Image (cartoon, rainbow, N blue to C red):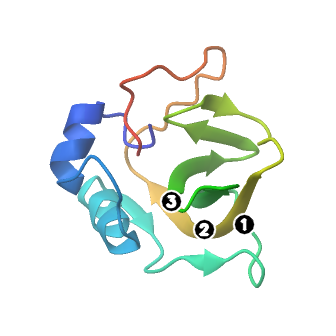
């Protein structure tokens, strides 16, 4: 989503279809010309920046989920474009995005579609 690439292109960069580490996300973003922080920041200690990658935790689920946050909207490859998450979903940390040389998909008129990139 953030790098305007397909899911398959994203899988090729991350070399995984499943769980991704912060290090993998940072490396992939930089490969696409996206300037970002070196590590995740706890949202308990740092405010969320206007553009960042957010880690979401789901109640009763051990795994986490990376989501793009852009000025009040969440671009979620699983749920589409979301303004607010329901109870049971909490944000714990973020990876700040400083500069994007690639275009962000800012089309808020349509929900996300299966197959769109998780970036």
Q: Which mark is residue 62?
A: none
Of labels 2 and 1, earlier in sequence is 1
Q: Is residue 62 left or right of residue 115?
A: right
Closer to us: 7 or 63: 63
Q: Residue at x 21, y 34 (%)?
A: 8
- Residue 38 locus on image (x, y percent): 43, 80
Q: Are marks 2 and 1 in contact (CB under 8 Å)?
A: yes
Q: Which element is circle 3 on?
A: loop
* Mark found first going from the N terminus, 2 or 3: 3
Task: Using the rendered view, name the quadrant where residue 26 is placed.
Answer: bottom left
* Residue 89 position (above or below residue 118): below
Mark found first going from the N terminus, 1 or 3: 1
Which residue is nearer to you in this view: 57 or 80? 57
Q: Nearer the viewer, mark 2 or mark 3?
A: 3
The image's mark for residue 94 is 2
Q: Say which mark, if any, is on residue 63.
A: 3
Is residue 63 rendered to the left or right of residue 34?
Answer: right
For mark 1, does the 10 Å Cα neighbourhood hold few (<14), some (14 to 19), or many (20 or more) residues?
many
């Amino acid at each position: 989503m953030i790098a305007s690439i397909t899911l398959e292109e994203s899988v090729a960069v991350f070399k995984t279809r499943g769980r991704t580490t912060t290090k993998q996300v940072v490396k992939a973003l930089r490969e696409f010309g996206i300037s970002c922080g070196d590590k995740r920041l706890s949202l308990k200690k740092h405010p969320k920046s206007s553009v960042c990658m957010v880690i979401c935790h789901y109640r009763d689920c051990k795994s986490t989920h990376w989501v793009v946050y852009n000025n009040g909207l969440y671009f979620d490859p699983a749920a589409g474009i979301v303004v607010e998450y329901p109870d049971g979903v909490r944000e714990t940390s973020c990876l700040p995005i400083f500069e994007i040389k690639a275009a962000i998909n800012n089309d808020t008129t349509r929900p996300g579609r299966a197959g769109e990139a998780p970036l």
